[in-house]
Image (tube, helix red, strand yellow):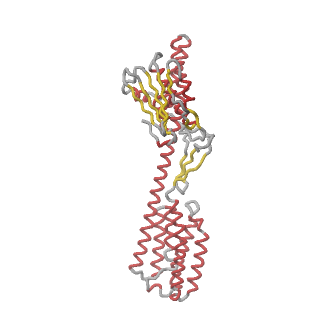
Amino acid sequence: MTGRERVVRMSVEQPLWRALTAYRVLTLIYAALLAGFGAEKYERPWVAAAFLGFLALWTLGTLRRVAGAASCTKRFLGLDLAVALTGILLTPLADLDAQHHDGPTLPSIWTAGSVLAFALKGGWRWAAFASTLVAAANIVERGEPSEDTFHNVLLVWVASIAIGYVVEVARASERTLARALEIEAATRERERLARDIHDSVLQVLAMVQRRGTALGGEAAELGRMAGEQEVALRTLVSTGLVPTSRLSEDSGEGAVVRVVDPDDPGATWGTSGTSGTETDLRALLAPHAGSRVTFSEPGTPVPLATETARELAAAVSAALDNVRVHAGPDARAWILVEDEPDTVIVTVRDDGPGIPEGRLDQAEGEGRLGVALSIRGRLRDLGGTAELISVSGQGTEVELKVPKVSRGKAGSAR
């Protein structure tokens, strides 16, 4: 499969990094205002001014460091926590009476931002480590910590650990989602290839087997070999290994899924066509008309996106192939195209013996995926539906519905 690769990043933690960036700036402003309005209580105001000036330069100069997990390195986290701890321990030097009242420390609630960075980067264990150091620094700074001090320390400790745990759960969920998307992409690509193989190679091998058996001699041996290869190929199609079209990875900033862009003109993506060009569906179905196939069409064009029209026409062709193979050479078929305001409906009906109950499930189990993939699979990928009605002795009817504006995977195939 070719086409331009694009990266889809799924991250519920990235908004948390943006929130942390804003938090650090706002709490810097808060700490500066708090120190300004309470300047008269400082015996050494120059200590507070020097530290807050450095804190402002540090905060504004490291905003890019807290923009995401990749840029927030262990070294930066260590230095950032050191700044917070230094500010806490310098508080008694600026305010000689700090140990005798419950006033704020120099960095104030800015310190919590440093702890939260640990939580976002490494989860709850890192958060517990950082918050424990902050708690120890606060207790040392107070000398004789009060109940309020213990309350504030415990609040930071519990909140940071909780956020760290949430981040770990979010990352695990993203990895699971990325893996599910990878499996879904591999399954869809396998089904697309299986449809193409069923519509070409498998039918040719089946024809060679029938003709060879009928001719006898060396042709019979060729037919036998073709039959063996048909069985092997059907088994491969049913359980086969297909390279995944999306590769998931954990980038540290959430799960990343690399996908082939279906809007790329070079991509061979077997889902709903979103091309800007349109094709008259009647032109693709008209060649099926013949002595035993009656084609009924509207008097006006039935425009569909080109890829959608081709896939729908291929599904009709697969239905007619089933008529020829299973209903017998004398069976007649009718194709009816209905152009509704939002939907195009194509009905393929035959007068054959019908399909015995349970036969479709049995055929799918044997690797004969004509209805499952060539018809239902195509309609599902177009966002439409495929409904098969068969009554023993009264023929089979296949009703194919596709929306004019394809919904892709939103549709379902019954």
Compared with 31, 382 (above or below) is above
User: In this view of the protein, can residue 187 be seen by the observer?
Assistant: no
Residue 4 shown left or right of residue 172 in the figure: right
**Picture layout, residue 376 above or below residue 228:** below
Residue 284: x %, y % from top left: 56, 29
The quadrant of the picture occupied by the N terminus is: top right
Q: Nearer the viewer, residue 410 or 347?
A: 347
Q: Is residue 259 found left or right of 126 in the rendered image?
A: right
Whether residue 211 appears in this view of the structure is: yes
Q: Nearer the viewer, residue 360 or 406?
A: 406
| Residue at the extreme front | 299
Residue 388 percent across, percent down from the top left: 42, 30
Q: Out of 165 and 30, give the one closest to the viewer.
A: 30
In the image, residue 23 above or below residue 104 = above
Provide residue 56's location: percent of width, then percent of height: 59, 75
Q: How many marks?
A: 0
In the picture, which quadrant includes the C terminus?
top left
Q: Position of residue 337 (x, y in %)?
A: 49, 30
Viewer-proximal residue among 162 and 342: 342
The residue positioned 48% from the left and 61% from the top of the image is: 123
